[in-house]
Image: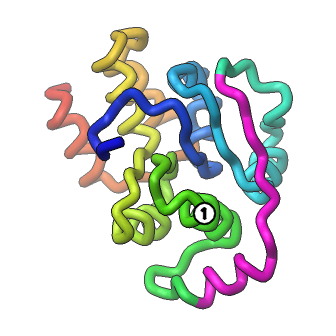
């Protein structure tokens, strides 16, 4: 699969995008995937935010992977610049296990840099909304982007907001 291929059926997901799309009632953007792979640490973080993966109304099958603490420590020692968090190390481990062949959904810039340096396709919350819109026009893109930037807990710079709005000509 090329990095531009939008017919993805499986993805690995970090906490941020699931949390942010839930906050704006747009979890349906995940409906195009058949399987959503999550490390158990991401499931734990989502639970801490009150989002229980076993109660999500998704078409995608959620596959939870147990990550090995020894591997996580090794990953954290290897990836010191930029440093990543423990749950992000779990996401990195899953990506590494499949030779960075599955796309990863994350809003974490440090994790994105580590994955992209290895040729992994990385998609953020705004990116998936835009891709979903261009494929099936199922969402009101301007409204969804405004909700994401103004109503969710996603933290982005003013420069990134301006860049997205310029791309969308909003």
Q: Is residue 62 within the magenta segment?
A: yes
Is 89 placed above or below 58 here? below
Q: Which residues lie in the magenta part?
A: 60-77
Q: Which residue is mark 1?
A: 97
Q: In the image, what residue occupies the spot 41% across and 9% down? A: 138
For the N terminus, the quadrant is: top left
- Magenta span includes 69: yes
Image side of residue 19 versus residue 43, left or right:
left
Residue at 40% in and 58% down: 120
State the image coordinates of residue 100 (x, y, percent, origin top left): 47, 59
| Position of residue 3 in the picture relative to residue 97 (left or right) | left
Image x and y of residue 153, in percent = 57, 45
Q: Which residue is found at the position 76% from the left and 25% from the top?
A: 56
Residue 129 falls in which quadrant of the image?
Answer: top left
Colour pattern: rainbow
Q: Position of residue 84 (x, y in %)?
A: 56, 74
- Compared to 138, does 163 lie above or below? below
Residue at point 31% right, 46% down? 3
Q: Nearer the viewer, residue 72 or 102?
A: 102
Quadrant of the rendering where the C terminus is positioned: top left
Q: Tell me the crowding category of disc 1: few under 14, some 14 to 19, or many 20 or more residues within 10 angstroms, Cα based.
A: few
Q: Quadrant of residue 109?
A: bottom left
Q: Position of residue 110 (x, y in %)?
A: 46, 70
Q: Does 126 appear above or below 131?
A: below
Please say if 135 is above or below 126: above
SS at badge 1: helix
Seen from the viewer's position, the closer of residues 32 and 161 is 32
Q: How many numbered discs?
A: 1
Left-right relation of 42 to 125: right
């Amino acid at each position: 699969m090329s990095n531009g291929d939008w017919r993805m059926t499986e993805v690995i997901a970090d906490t941020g995008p699931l949390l942010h799309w839930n906050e704006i009632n747009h979890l349906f953007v995940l409906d195009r995937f058949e399987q959503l792979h999550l490390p158990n640490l991401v499931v734990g973080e989502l639970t801490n935010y009150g989002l229980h993966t076993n109660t999500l109304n998704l078409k995608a099958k959620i596959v939870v992977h147990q990550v090995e603490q020894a591997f996580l420590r090794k990953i954290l020692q290897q990836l010191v610049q930029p440093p990543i968090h423990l749950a992000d190390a779990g996401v990195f481990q899953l990506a590494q296990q499949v030779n960075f062949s599955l796309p990863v959904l994350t809003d974490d810039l440090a994790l994105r840099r580590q994955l992209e340096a290895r040729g992994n396709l990385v998609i953020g919350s705004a990116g998936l909304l835009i891709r979903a819109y261009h494929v099936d026009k199922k969402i009101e893109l301007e409204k969804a982007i405004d909700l994401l930037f103004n109503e969710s807990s996603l933290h982005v710079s003013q420069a990134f907001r301006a860049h997205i709005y310029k791309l969308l000509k909003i």
